[in-house]
Image (cartoon, grey):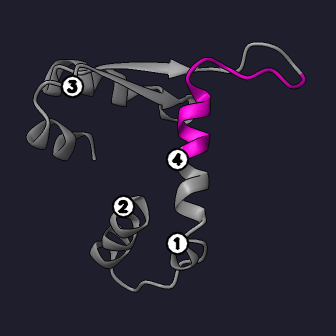
Amino acid sequence: MLARLRERFTTIALVWADAGYSGRMLVWARNVLHLTVQIVKRSEPGFVVPPRRWVVERTFAWISKHRRCVRDYETKPDHHEAMIYIAMI
């Protein structure tokens, strides 16, 4: 996904990611794609809104409002991608 992002939008320089994406992907994105990936981690136990996490959660909520994106109805990944584009419109 990051490679396609780099192909389509060459001006993007910073990507926020969840802690599950740390590791070799950070080094690969920096060396191959010349992208800076900033990991947004949880800081304290309990309810604390991490910085920029609301952007991701809001986007997931918008996608989930579209009925076909709630469950995995699509059989091909490109069909599911199209449904996400439609939901975001």
Task: Magenta stretch: give its range.
Answer: 46-58
Other residues around mark 4 within 10 Å, as few (<14) / some (14–19) / many (≥20)? few
Q: Position of residue 18 (x, y in %)?
A: 54, 32
Q: Amino acid at mark 3?
A: Ile
**Under tag 1, what secondary structure?**
helix
The mark lying in front, picked from 4 and 3, is 4
Q: Earlier in the sequence, mark 1 or mark 4?
A: 4
Mark 2 vs 1, N-terminal side = 1
Report which residue position mark 3 lands on. 12
On whether residue 47 falls in the magenta region, the answer is yes
Circles 2 and 1 in contact, beta carbons < 8 Å: no
Say which element carries label 2: loop
Earlier residue among tags 3 and 2: 3
Measured as percent of width and height from the top left, residue 52 is found at 55, 23
Q: Earlier in the sequence, mark 2 or mark 4?
A: 4
Is 34 above or below relative to 19? above
Q: Residue at x 14, y 26 (%)?
A: 32
- In the image: residue 45, left or right of residue 66: right
**Which residue position holds label 2?**
89
In this rendering, the answer to whether 19 lies above or below 58 is: above
Classed neighbour count for the residue bearing mark 1: other residues with Cα under 10 Å, few (<14), some (14–19), many (≥20): some
